[in-house]
């Protein structure tokens, strides 16, 4: 990998002990939404106080065309540059201190579905999206097959070295940058069962459940129930 430019995308194989240990797990939906808007993963939703028409009624000098132009602007993926009109994933960027066992947040990056799958290659492999994720990674970074394989080998080797290590979450960057206050970060929420946020996450969760011998699936039907007065 010598003399190669810094890749636009890198595989991020999170240690098993750190799965579900992230920003989204310890902040409210409102705080997470604010971060998504701040870093370009989502457009701000209209409210009574921000709706262009409502503002124009209160202030006739407001240029509605300017508001609508802003709304029409697409969101741009920080990985491949793809533009979308709806929403992107907000990727959390981490640095792992293997000596002091600290998992430190260092930033965010809005990414499309393809880039998100490429970054989280381990999860993509587990749900049958590994090959497409590898192709996307190779294409975005302009890599040869050898460069791709070398990167994957390094990521896997690093993941194996971190196996069994338990890291402490460091979210001080959020407070330092004035994005959230300490009161808005709830580290005790990490004790709750992990939540599923997207389609690939749901597939991964279901696959893991089906591979567990103790899993019992109960299918119930509620149509046609008649309420009987007592």
Image (cartoon, grey):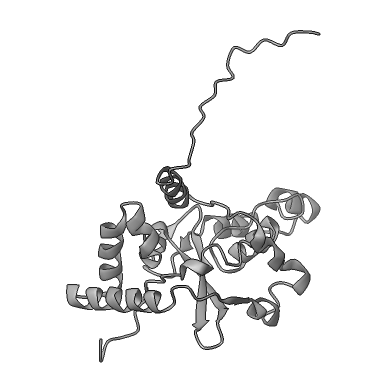
Seen from the viewer's position, the closer of residues 63 and 105 is 105
Can residue 82 be seen from the camera position used here?
Answer: no
Residue 112, compared with residue 199, is above or below; it is: below
Kindly identify the residue that appears in the image at 75 percent across and 54 percent down.
55
Seen from the viewer's position, the closer of residues 140 and 194 is 194
Image quarter of the C terminus = top right
Residue 125, compared with residue 138, is above or below; it is: above
Instruction: Find residue 80 and report its horizontal and vertical position in percent.
Output: 36, 68
Kindly identify the residue that appears in the image at 69 percent across and 68 percent down.
187
Kindly identify the residue that appears in the image at 49 percent across and 51 percent down.
198
Kindly identify the residue that appears in the image at 67 percent across and 56 percent down.
29
Image position of 212 (left or right of 189): left
The total of numbered circles placed on residues is 0
Image quarter of the N terminus = bottom left
Residue at the bottom extreme of this rendering: 3
Residue at the front extreme of this rendering: 214
Which of the 4 image quarters holds residue 132? bottom left
Can residue 134 be seen from the camera position used here?
Answer: yes
Instruction: Find residue 149 and report its horizontal and vertical position in percent.
Output: 23, 74
Residue 226, compared with residue 41, is above or below; it is: above
Image position of 206 (left or right of 175): left
Seen from the viewer's position, the closer of residues 168 and 149 is 168
Instruction: Find residue 19 and report its horizontal and vertical position in percent.
Output: 51, 64
């Amino acid at each position: 990998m010598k003399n190669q430019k810094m890749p636009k995308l890198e595989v991020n194989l999170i240690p098993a002990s750190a799965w579900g240990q992230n920003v989204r797990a310890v902040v409210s939906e409102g705080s997470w939404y604010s971060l998504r808007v701040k870093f370009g993963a989502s457009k701000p939703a209209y409210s009574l106080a921000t709706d262009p028409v409502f503002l124009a009624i209160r202030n006739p000098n407001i240029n509605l065309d300017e508001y609508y132009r802003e709304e029409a602007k697409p969101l741009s993926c920080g990985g491949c540059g793809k533009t979308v009109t709806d929403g992107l994933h907000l990727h959390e960027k981490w640095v792992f201190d293997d000596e002091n066992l600290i998992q430190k947040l260092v930033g965010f990056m809005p990414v499309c579905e393809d880039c998100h799958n490429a970054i989280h290659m381990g999860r993509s492999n587990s749900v049958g999206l590994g090959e497409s994720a590898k192709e996307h990674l190779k294409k975005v970074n302009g890599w040869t097959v050898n460069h791709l394989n070398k990167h994957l080998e390094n990521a896997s080797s690093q993941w194996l070295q971190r196996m069994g290590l338990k890291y402490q979450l460091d979210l001080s960057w959020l407070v330092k940058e004035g994005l959230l206050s300490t009161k808005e970060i709830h580290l005790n929420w990490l004790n709750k069962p992990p939540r599923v946020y997207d389609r690939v996450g749901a597939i991964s969760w279901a696959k893991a459940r089906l591979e567990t011998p103790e899993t019992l699936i109960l299918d119930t039907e509620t149509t046609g129930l008649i309420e009987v007065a007592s």
